[in-house]
Image: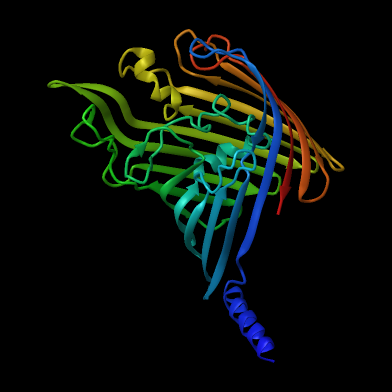
Amino acid sequence: MKKSILALAVAAALAAPLAAQADTILYGSARVSVDYNEDEGTDLLDGDGNWDVVNNASRLGVQGSEDLGGGLSAIYQYEFGVDATEGGNFNGNRPKFVGLRGSFGQLTIGTQQTPYYEVVGINDTFNTSLSFGPTVWLGGFSNGFNANFDNEGRAESQGSMERVSNSVYYSTPDFGGFSASALLVMGSSFNLGGSTFSINEKDGYSDGVDQWNIALKYSNGPFFAGVTYVSLEGSVVGITEGASFVPVLDLDRDQWGVGLGYQSGPFSVGLIYEQGDLNQWGLFEPLLTGGLNDLDDQWSASVTGAYTFGNNTIRALYGQMDTGLPGSDAIQNWALGYQYNLSKRTLVWVEYVGRDAKDDTLFYGDADGISIGTRVDF
């Protein structure tokens, strides 16, 4: 009898917090592939062909909400990157935020997906992580400036425009298919530390808003259209040589993008265009131009298409990226993919990604890749 009473007491203690968090959902996605990459190399790196078991943005998270009454809800999400291939788990800048949702829209604070990616990410439809990288869109992974900061308050000059930390995000309600969103990054001022690097009198980033991003979107029926603008509010970072200040990085940069989409039955198509200097080409601008001379604004454009029949989906992408380098032709990208859905939550894929870098032999060379993988969502 005592054992039964104890068991009931333990069960009640465990059930109480679960009942209070009835709207909490545990979810995840395991995405692993075997890839073969053939890279012809660049002036800086030798190319080679190799096989690899690859993690493709697998993740684990919890999300939920609490009804506060009067149409107001508290919402939260904690998502972590997990890696079944090399054990790099619970890392990355995946979404982690808390906020409120109501008739006024939604307001959240934390690490969040940007309005920029919500527009240009319309073409990020392939399963392999090879398909939407730094030569396909200007906001590709490890491809540009942002206002993310590490645990010591130091700015990380390179990073993704897909998600940013230290951010406040607001989105309006839907008005007949129209909506707007704005994101502000406030991560303290720029500080490289040490004695080699210094900054000018205005600090590297603003003491207030370091980066801001806005977007206007229309989504109704089969149509999607969006336009977005992102600005990094910084000044000039340089090296102090004696009494002289040598400028190295100009951190006052911006970029804009447009995304268009259409889906009708089994067919879908997406088109994006982006232009600006808030990307890796701006980062290497002093090296490429011998100072802080402006390169031509970099641009990229791509189109994707997909067709679904039964449990099968085929996809195709073609795009170009102009680096702004004098005398350099645009990088060309293409991808083809086949996906078979074993169930609503499990699929397998075979995808091919190619790149023709032409004259851009400093950073990227011609490359081909094949990815064979599986994905299970839960």
Residue 292 picture location, percent across and down:
31, 19
Residue located farthest toward the front when viewing the structure as drawn: 2
| Left-right relation of 281 to 342 | left
| Left-right relation of 266 to 330 | right
Residue located farthest toward the right when viewing the structure as drawn: 310
Above or below, 369 against 271 in this view is above
Q: Nearer the viewer, residue 358 or 264?
A: 358
Q: Residue at x 48, y 29 (%)?
A: 143
Give residue 237's quadrant in the image.
top left
Q: Residue at x 62, y 72 (%)?
A: 22
Q: Residue at x 61, y 14 (%)?
A: 366
Label tally: 0
Q: Quadrant of the N terminus?
A: bottom right
Q: Nearer the viewer, residue 153 or 185?
A: 153
Q: Residue at x 59, y 38 (%)?
A: 121
Q: Nearer the viewer, residue 329 or 8?
A: 8
Residue 334 picture location, percent across and down:
67, 23
Residue 152 picture location, percent across and down:
32, 45
| Left-right relation of 311 to 139 | right
Above or below, 256 against 110 in this view is above
Q: Nearer the viewer, residue 148 or 115?
A: 148
Q: Is residue 186 visible?
A: yes
Q: Is residue 38 visible?
A: no
Residue 38 picture location, percent across and down:
66, 18
User: By what rule are the colours in the image chosen?
Assistant: rainbow
Above or below, 245 against 103 in this view is above
Residue located farthest toward the bottom when viewing the structure as drawn: 1
Q: Quadrant of the C terminus?
A: bottom right
